[in-house]
Image: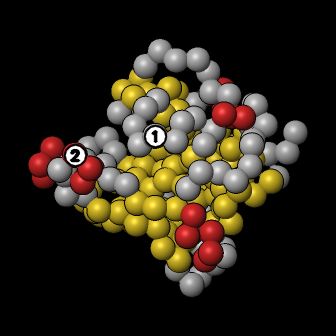
Amino acid sequence: MTVLFDFTHPPAIEAWYALGDRVMGGRSVGQLRPTGQGHAIFEGFVSFENNGGFASIRSQPLDRTLPPNAEFIVEAQGDGKTYKFVARTDGGFDGVAYQATFTPRAECWETYRFAATELTPTFRGRPVSAPPLNSAAITTLGLMIAGKQFGPFALRLRRIAIADA
């Protein structure tokens, strides 16, 4: 396993920033912060005000090229809500995003695996026709909560990695 982001070390959090529905006038909020307990937490509140409804975090551009058919590993503990793991291949704010959904339970840590070729291409949350993801082209990774899940949310994270070939 090659670790991309080790959230057991607070400096890994500095490579991420919040990006939510406020860019469209919404009122949802989210942040990634250290807990002091060996993990980070992506937390906040999803609001439907002003046509809002999502919160997300995105990494700064990756400092390495990934293998073309990477398998991503996410170690998380959730709150029973559904989240999206997101990969982008361009550095722009908007564009095609490749996504996979997962619903981590609150009572235990779980490991999720997402093959790059299985991520669904989307644009603004809707599926689109696009070539399969070549993970060597990924520029940023992200996490998101959307899908009409109003209210507080909390996703704990230990690490994001790729499986070694």
Q: Residue at x 66, y 74 (%)?
A: 8
Residue 24 % position (x, y): 22, 46
Find the residue positioned furthest to the front: 92
Residue 6 % position (x, y): 68, 66
The label number, if any, that marks residue 92 in the structure image: 1
Which-is-in-front pick, marks 1 and 2?
1
3D distance between C-alphas at marks 1 and 2: 16 Å
Q: Residue at x 43, y 19 (%)?
A: 128
The residue under label 2 is 24
Find the residue positioned furthest to the right: 165
Q: Nearer the viewer, residue 132 or 115?
A: 132
Residue 88 % position (x, y): 54, 38
Q: Residues within 10 Å of mark 1 (few under 14, many from 20)?
A: few
Q: Is residue 155 above or below residue 25?
A: below
Residue 84 % position (x, y): 47, 44
Q: Amino acid at mark 1?
A: Gly
Q: Amino acid at mark 2?
A: Met
- Which of the marked residues, 1 or 2, is nearer the chain's N terminus? 2
Q: Residue at x 19, y 57 (%)?
A: 27
Q: Quadrant of the C terminus?
A: top right
- Left or right: 51 as drawn, with respect to 124: left
- Left or right: 26 as drawn, with respect to 160: left
Q: Quadrant of residue 10?
A: bottom right
Q: Is residue 93 above or below residue 22?
A: above
Q: Residue at x 62, y 27 (%)?
A: 133
What's the coloring here?
secondary structure
- Left or right: 121 as drawn, with respect to 131: left
Confirm or deny contact between disc 1 and disc 2 (CB under 8 A).
no
Q: Is residue 39 visible?
A: yes
Q: Residues within 10 Å of mark 2 (few under 14, many from 20)?
A: few
